[in-house]
Image (cartoon, grey):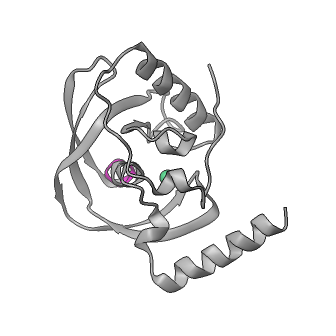
Amino acid sequence: MAVLPLIEFPETVLKKVAEPVDKVDEAVRKLLRDMADTMYDAPGIGLAAPQIGISRRIIVVDVNWREQERSPRGYINPEIVFSDGRIDFEEGCLSVPEYQAEVKRASRVVVRALDPDGKPVEVDAEGVEAVCFQHELDHLDGMLFIDRISRLKRSLYVKRRRKELAGR
Ligand code: NI
């Protein structure tokens, strides 16, 4: 069990396009366990490897753990192969402290990935789970939810964040 330090905006690793994983081995599985520990501790419902400073295409997701038993699911090299519908969803991010904003997303996505054993899996997700996948996959492409809001809202947040950081 290891809770890792979270990388926060505006660290540059969050802007990088993450590299695909070519071999799903024990090191990747250990990373996934640590990422799950970090996600629950934060607490959050999803986490992408760049958020712990590792620029690899790895995410962990568990959208229902507050209501149900914990079941962290790790996905390696995930891709959205189908999306449908629209949903406006109030998002936050463990790497964007003290901020939420509404983001337009697809209400349903189908994701293809490798599971922690390296086997191909396909997930059909709706609602909050679909939003979570889109948010985490954005992280793998160097994109944050604040890159999907209006320029005005974003600049207000960036200003506030700069002030906070300067005051530390
Ligand atoms: Ni995030």
Query: Bounds of the magenta span?
Result: 128-132
**Which residue is painted at 56% across and 37% down in the image?**
39
**Total tally of numbered discs in the picture:** 0
**Which residue is painted at 63% across and 23% down in the image?**
2
Which of the 4 image quarters holds residue 88?
bottom left
Residue 26, image x and y in percent?
41, 13
Residue 120 visible from this viewpoint? yes
Which of the 4 image quarters holds residue 156?
bottom right
Q: Nearer the viewer, residue 157 or 43?
A: 157
Residue 20, image x and y in percent?
31, 37
Residue 50, image x and y in percent?
49, 44
Q: What secondary structure prevails in the magenta region?
A: helix
Residue 48 visible from this viewpoint? no
76 to 146, vertically: above or below: above
92 to 163, vertically: above or below: above
Q: Is residue 101 magenta?
A: no
77 to 144, vertically: above or below: above
In the rendered structure, the answer to whether residue 112 lies left or right of residue 136 reads left
The residue lying furthest to the top in this view is 26
Residue 77, image x and y in percent?
29, 36
Figure quadrant of the N terminus: top right
Figure quadrant of the C terminus: bottom right
**Which residue is painted at 18% across and 56% down in the image?**
83
